[in-house]
Amino acid sequence: MTANHLLEIKQYGQSIWMDNLSRDLIQSGELKQLVETSGICGITSNPAIFQKAIAGNAVYDEAIEAGIRAGQSVNEIYESLVFDDIRQACDILMPVYKQTGGLDGYVSIEVPPAVAHDTEATIEAAKRYHAAINRPNVMIKIPGTQEGLPAIEAVIAAGISVNVTLLFSVDSYVSSAKAYIRGLEARVEKGEDISKIASVASFFLSRIDSNIDAKIDEKLKGIDDMKAREKLLAIKGKVAIANAKIAYQEYKKIVESDRWKQLAAKGANVQRLLWASTSTKNPEYSDVMYVDELIGPDTVNTLPPTTIDACADHCDVQSRIETHVPEAYHLIESLKDPDVDINLDQVMAELLIDGIEKFVQPFDALMRSLEEKIQQLTPVS
């Protein structure tokens, strides 16, 4: 029997979560099997995943019809479908949650993407989702936007576990970690328990390389100078991993700080870095490069099903999160070279806008397809 390399990763202090959820996966028993035999110890979902799961899938028809009979709105039907899937997934992962003392076993659900720039609406949605799902191992996803940061702080202070999503820049990761810390400190001030709260900071990878590689390909078209070409080619497919390794160094500084140690003494759980957007978009690159290069302690990697299969088959498992760190800093610095001239801050800002849009569009498409399905299933009076 061939070795499942996913199981080896846990030995290095990294947890593997799956970036996928659907009722088919739950009802077929596949999710339970992945948890029990393949080392999957968490689930992340987002509007794009639910759009694929629900649109045109007859498995949801009975629940939609029940919603119609109950006189529910399109949004209420959507939430009832999604909350039910999340609850069932939480129940399947509850043994992991208990075995790991609340380190793993989480299922993440995102607040509506349209509220990404509205602090109060984000707080309200996070609290409502948490109460409605009513499981200790649900994690509410909040985008790491400027408006999202005070929401993260408030939601953590309310005792709700948070997955900070759509992080691209190291600075935005550090800001999200500080928001987590402030939320915990607010609880401590009120004499409330902080030992049951967990958080991950979801740091996106492949989208960074896709964006920068496209810019490099464009620049290469007009450059004959071999030295300049070499500089550009040396960066291709390398920025996301370098950026992640630098973020991990910032994570270490945070957990080694006196401020954090005071919270840890009161039972606080570290906010782990989670590697997201880990399917390789360029066929020229290894299909597991965003796994192999970022294995290390106190991290999570969330993988779509195709990457789970690829990694189980041929991941080269070693702890590499702290290898080639000086080179990572050098690579990021080299983007400022006049021959390269790529503004990383601008790239990260573009990616955040694009990332929100990538969730808004499928959410809107799902609501439209759900509306059509409701019309089809509504009995003619």
Image (tube, rainbow, N blue to C red):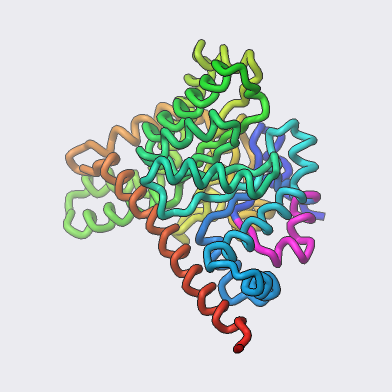
| Quadrant (top left, top right, bottom left, bottom right) of the C terminus | bottom right
Residue 238: % across, % down: 40, 44
327 on left or right of 255: left
Residue at image position (38%, 41%) is 145
Task: Evaluate whether residue 5 shows in this view.
Answer: no
Return the x and y of residue 366 as percentages of the image width and height: 50, 68
Relative to residue 179, is residue 317 depicted above or below? below
Quadrant placement of the N terminus = bottom right
Q: Quadrant of residue 318?
A: top right
- Residue 31 forms part of the magenta stretch: yes
**Residue reaching furthest right?**
1
- Chief secondary structure of the magenta portion: helix
Tell me where residue 237 appears, x and y as whole percent.
40, 49
Magenta region, residue range: 20-36
> Outermost residue toward the front?
381
Q: Which residue does the image show at 23% across and 36% down from the upper left? A: 336
- The residue sitting at 43% across, 46% down in the picture is 121
Q: Which corner quadrant of the image does residue 59 belong to?
A: bottom right
Q: Is 267 in front, or is 232?
A: 267
Q: For this view, does 256 lie left or right of residue 314?
A: left
